[in-house]
Amino acid sequence: MKTLIKNVQIYMNAQKIETGYLLIEEDVIAEIGPMEKCPTVPDSYTSIELSNKYKLIPGFIDLHIHGAAGADTMDGTKEALETMAIALPKEGTTSFLATTMTTAQSDIERALKNAASYMNEHNEKGKAEVIGVHLEGPFISPKRIGAQHPDHVILPSVELFRNWQEIAEGHIKLVTMAPEQPNGLELVRYLRKEGVVASIGHSDATYEQVIQSIEAGVNHATHLFNQMRPLHHREPGVVGAALLHDEIKCEIIADGIHVRPEMVRLAFKNKGKDGMILITDAMRAKCLGEGMYDLGGQAVTVKNQKATLEDGTLAGSIIKLKDAAKNMQAFTDCGLEAVIQMASANPAKQLNIYDRKGSIERGKDADLVVLDENDDVCMTFCRGRIAYSTLEG
């Protein structure tokens, strides 16, 4: 399949082409350039004629998403992951980490086995690609449970992780954990050796303990500010360490609910576009209406754009990544280029897949999003195939 996109602003890695073209051959970007160099292609090519009010950007990569459109990673079915893969391109997301919860070990294992099977057999072009698993818990602090299930928290274990990675056929790419727990640093060191991202999250670590974990290999922070020891002027905690240390890339849920806009701005001023990653942490209610839902075996009420447990604890989000991107610009006054860095490039670099995703460059996967003048998503390509479109023709 070959597609030519014409007359569009193209946001490349280090430059912007004001009016350009992009040629897709099969599932990769074959050629990019200004319109004056646009080739004449045979009728067998699909030609998409736009105008330069439209912007072509790399697809978003969501490193932390539990579910969408009624489906959840923990459902442990092909249909659940496929539902997510079909729904996410509507918000500009072209690839994602299927994210687990702190639940019974048998449920985690079923979800891991299912994710591996899906990645091996059902990752189709034209749908958002499952690029791995984010294991959120169960190696977390009982003091920072959040919406994780308190009955299933366990101590970090290299042996158990090794078993789970075998079940997942090597597809666990990121682990959220509390490194201050017994055996925590041992697991961090093992993850670093295996090339798995070790993320501090749901953690009550002191500043000194975070420094130890960074030295051991932690280089990521799960949903900054949420469920971690907060900033205090005599104990900087996890938040203070994450803001101060460039080694750590910080996820953030920019829905204005999990983190107040001013705190998003504070984080951006400290970390900059190179130090932050936009995520949704969305649960199955995303794309659906208000009502009662399930998250990791716990009842969740969705009302007024909030997802909460019975006691009022926030239980993931229902935000779409396209809206998080807009919010980020509104909260921080950053530009679209910074949003692309935080939602596309940084996630790809963190997972060590920047050679094929995260920017518009020749030879990379044709994971592309067309935005209109209001930065609304109007077309999404997943590995060269149209996955979503509101444009006529």
Image: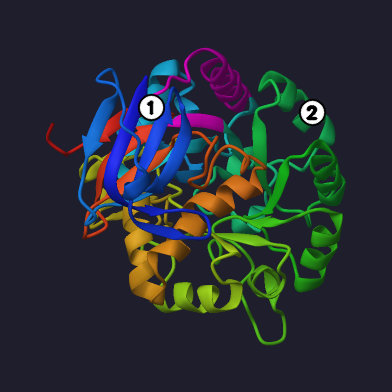
Q: Is residue 383 above or below residue 124?
A: below
Q: Secondary structure at mark 2?
A: helix
The residue shown at (45%, 37%) is 31
Q: Position of residue 341 (x, y in %)?
A: 51, 58
Residues drawn in magenta: 106-131
Left or right: 383, with 230 as reference point: left
Give the residue pinned by disc 2.
162
Left or right: 112, with 328 as reference point: right
Residue lying farthest bottom?
233
Q: CA distance from mark 2 to mark 1?
A: 30 Å
Q: Position of residue 141 (x, y in %)?
A: 68, 53
The answer to whether one can see residue 337 in this image is yes
Rendered-image quadrant of the C terminus: top left
Left or right: 145, with 93 as reference point: right
Q: Is residue 363 above or below residue 216?
A: above
Give the residue pinned by disc 1.
127
Q: Does the magenta portion include 121? A: yes
Left or right: 230, with 73 as reference point: right
What number is the disc on residue 81?
none
Q: Is residue 236 above or below residue 327?
A: below
